[in-house]
Amino acid sequence: MVGAMTKVATKENIPGGVVHDLPPDLEAELTADPAVLAAWLDITPLARNEWICWVEDAKKAETRAKRIGRAGENLADGKRRPCCWPGCTHRVRDGGRT
């Protein structure tokens, strides 16, 4: 729960995902709006992993920039995972299989 947090989030302690580190461009989007950052801190590490992987999965710089903007908008709207995306293929599932 975000309201119960006693530690203030700083750039040095904003968490990434389970297997993906938080990239600087997504971090900039998260820290630009306190509501977006609060939403990020309220989701699970697996959900953060999905957002990061979704952004990093973009093949073009323009697509990546659009996804970062959408991530901020969607998090601010209360969405906890990227819409219409099958999920991160990098995290280990099913007893060690990916």
Image (cartoon, grey):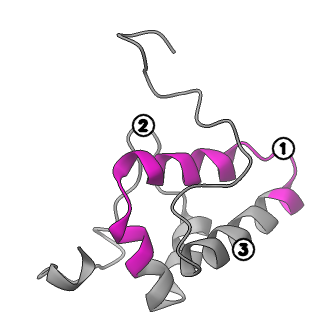
Mark 3 and mark 1 lie on one chain; the one further toward the N terminus is 1
Q: Which residues are magenta?
A: 38-63
Query: Which numbered disc, 3 or 1, marks the residue closer to the eye?
Result: 3
Residue holding disc 2: 19
In the figure, is residue 51 to the left or right of 12? right
Pointer 3: residues within 10 angstroms few (<14), some, or many (20+)? some
List x then y, in percent, for residue 48.
46, 54
Spatial CA distance of label 3 from label 2 is 22 Å
List x then y, in percent, for residue 71.
64, 68
Residue 75, image quadrant: bottom right
Please tell me which residue lies in front, 30 or 23.
Answer: 30
Mark 3 and mark 2 lie on one chain; the one further toward the N terminus is 2
Spatial CA distance of label 3 from label 1 is 16 Å
Q: Amino acid at mark 1?
A: Lys
Magenta stretch: includes residue 49: yes
Q: Residue at x 14, y 81 (%)?
A: 4
